[in-house]
Image (spheres, grey):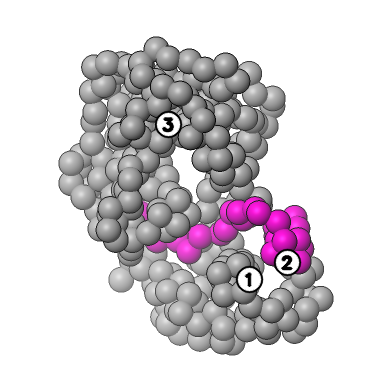
Amino acid sequence: MHAWEAIQKSVDYIEDNLTEEIPIDKLAEIANLSPFYFQRLFSRLVKKPVCEYIKLRRLARAVSDLKVKNSRILDAALDYGFSSHASFTRAFKETYGITPDEYRTTDVHLNQFVKPELILNYVMVDENVPLVTEGIVLEVTRRELTAPRTFIGIAKEIPISELLGGTDTSISFATKLWNEFHEVKPKIPHLLADGNEFGALYMGQAREGYCTYIAGAEAEHGSAEDGFAVFELPSAEYLVCGFEAESFEELTNSAVYKAQTFMTHWMEKHKLTTTDFAGEMYYPVKGDCAYMEHWILPVLIK
């Protein structure tokens, strides 16, 4: 068994037992490692100490319970191993920057520390060969765009730290921007009835520590509208990572992070880098399948 497989077993056990006591000795036994070596290896592969990781995953689950299940704050605290309302509130605010009360009464989305799939760092597939891992399917292809495509939407600066999806815990500015776009989308002329929604990340004139993000939808080529941002996807050969998940929520949360993890590894192995642009192409949800694509311009590392 590879080291990452042993640690993945412990990660899977943690996810299945977040409402129970999780002793380090038990996790080390599952990984067939000594407690000392297990904790060192876990921190190296997961990028967090074991106890910190367990806390972040419990808070992630509690976030869902507070909104979806409408749980009482004290119930969520006790369910996920916190000794009191106060200790849960303190950990919640340290992690997300707002209290549980503020979260429940404010229309915000919180970035979570995602459960990792370590296989994505170690398994390689060729172009046009799907990779199936827990809950998602990924495939890397090349796409020749012979005619530019125009997108109209709303553009704002977002912190670059938010690009660390899956490892950064904070309020999601990108999700807030998408919510704003969907409110005004029916009022934007020139949008194509069957066009894709599209998110683009680029530097533009953003301040240090920030990048520009546009949330928009496809419009008639060359069109523009006062008060809205326009982004043109130029004709070029793109590297596209398409991935699907069981729901749109899963797609835009953990699946995005997993796809980013895989593509970073994939490009390193193929001696490729990219420009300061990245695109997110969204497709309509069909049945039990949600699908999107990451579009990047590949640059060969010389």
Identify the amino acid type marked 2: Pro
Towards the viewer: 61 or 198: 198
Towards the viewer: 229 or 118: 229
Q: Which residues are magenta?
A: 94-120
In the rendered view, would you say 201 is above or below 91?
Answer: above
Q: Please tell me the numbered disc located at residue 230.
A: none
Give residue 289's position: percent from left, percent from top: 29, 56
Of the numbered discs 3 and 2, the one sitting upstream in the chain is: 2
In the rendered view, would you say 2 is above or below 179?
Answer: below
Give residue 90's position: percent from left, percent from top: 79, 68
| Residue 57 visible in rendering | no
Looking at the rendered structure, the number of numbered marks drawn on it comes to: 3
Residue at label 1? 66
Residue at label 3? 217
Give the Cα distance between marks 2 and 1: 8 Å
Q: Residue at x 33, y 64 (%)?
A: 134
Residues at marks 2 and 1 touching, judged by CB atoms closer than 8 Å: yes
Q: Around disc 2, counting alpha carbons within 10 Å, would you say few (fewer than 14), some (14 to 19), or many (20 or more)?
A: many
Q: Residue at x 56, y 44 (%)?
A: 179
Identify the amino acid type marked 1: Leu
Q: Secondary structure at mark 3?
A: strand
In the rendered view, would you say 214 is above or below 302?
Answer: below
Of the numbered discs 1 and 3, the one sitting upstream in the chain is: 1
Of the numbered discs 2 and 1, the one sitting upstream in the chain is: 1
Q: Residue at x 49, y 27 (%)?
A: 188
Identify the amino acid type marked 3: Ala
Give the Cα distance between marks 3 and 2: 33 Å
